[in-house]
Image: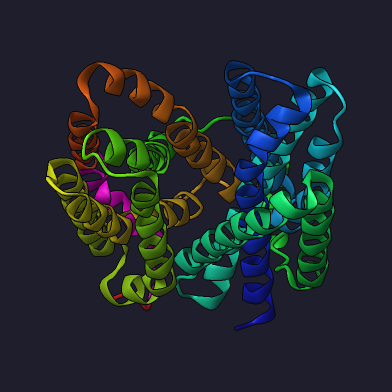
Amino acid sequence: MTPARYSISALFLANGFLIGSWAPKIPVMMDRLAITESVMGMLIVAFGVGSVVMMPVFGGITARHGSRMVVRFASIAVIPTLLAVTLAPSLSIAAFTVFLFGGIIGGMDVAMNANAVAVERKLGKAIMSSCHGFWSIGGLMGAALAGALLGQWGETVHAVALTAVTGLVIVLALPGVLDDSEPQSMAKRAPLALPRVPLPYLIGIMALFSMVPEGTILDWSAHYLRTSLGTDISVAALGFAAFSATMATMRFVGDAVRQRLGAVRTLRISTGIALAGLLVGGLAQTPAMAIAGFALAGVGIANLVPIAFSAAGNLPGIPSGIGLSIATVTGYCGLLLAPGIIGFVGEWTGFRPVFLGVAALLVVPFVLSPLARYAEFASDR
């Protein structure tokens, strides 16, 4: 692994580590601030709004100055954010720090994806899927650390520990970040504006309909297993666990698959597998079959977003930061906002039709799969 690839992989790991550490803190934070579920829901919305607001800002700066400077700034700025959330003494300060946390996490996401695209160009081969694999591993590690520390040592000790670990990983990674400022020289001279061509928006739609199924399984698989299939919570949790495990595994082999088959064929096969998995999960008559369906869906969903982001960062005539900011904002709207709408629908229809309907949404990235050619490399077959 080259220094640049090591560094960007480590930054994906750190970003996922912070996200994985955030969710387990929510009930502890609710107790500390003495707030209800609805108020906590508004804080979670503030996190999402912060991400969506700041992604285009960081994307524009990346387009003008290259990703190295931006990813360095965002990586350093993100280190104390979750500690700030932990130490917030009041609801108003907590809302601000959560918004700031979401904003810097989102900005770092755009910049590190742009730098991963630059590393792909330099190496002449795909690395984006494995980068997202490191993000998945970071999320699992963050959740595991939270589970071990929050109950025994409390919220503050947990926050200090995760801040120290995150800071160490980032400090070790930053010196090797690839300098991609030179290829952006034309973008520096040109005024930044939203592209007038449809390509980045179509790839954003591809990312959106790839991330809606991921968010649905994340937020509603356990509830579906409990209410529709009558299992207990310990078994219900296995639905998302199986999905996460297969998705992380496939992301580490996804680059080799994409390199061998090409991005377009890989996207089409992955979409078909994801659709089949969601159909199995939605039609399942037993918990074991539903869990197997979600595991199969993880195999397919794993490489949809990495391919879409690679394509968004390689569009002709469009700076990487602009293309990626459009794709990430559009895609993360599906991950952050769609599950809430799906919950409302599921309350009226039940969640079996929900998973079948979400499976149908994957027809969209399949139809748009020819756009994945922008993620191809000369060495792709």
In x, y percent, where is residue 292?
Answer: 23, 58
Q: Is residue 290 left or right of residue 92?
A: left
Q: Nearer the viewer, residue 190 or 108?
A: 108
Q: Is residue 208 left or right of residue 271?
A: right
Q: Residue at x 26, y 50 (%)?
A: 369
**Residue 308 counted in the magenta span:** no
Q: Based on the displayed image, in which of its 4 quarters is residue 161 positioned?
A: bottom right
Q: Is residue 369 magenta?
A: yes
Q: Which residues, given as a range, are shown in magenta?
A: 364-378
| Residue 283 image position (x, y, % from top left) | 12, 42
**Residue 324 percent across, percent down from the top left:** 53, 45
Near-viewer residue (224 or 314): 224
At which x and y percent is residue 17? 65, 57
Is residue 148 in view? yes
Of residues 224 and 97, the one drawn nearer to the viewer in this rendering: 224
**Vertical side of 185 occupied by 202: above or below:** above
Count of residue discs: 0
The relative height of residue 124 versus residue 75 in the rendered view (above or below) is below
Residue 361, quarter of the rendered image: top left
User: What kind of colouring is applied to the model shown?
Assistant: rainbow
Q: Would you say residue 79 is visible in this rendering?
A: no
Magenta-highlighted stretch: main secondary structure? helix
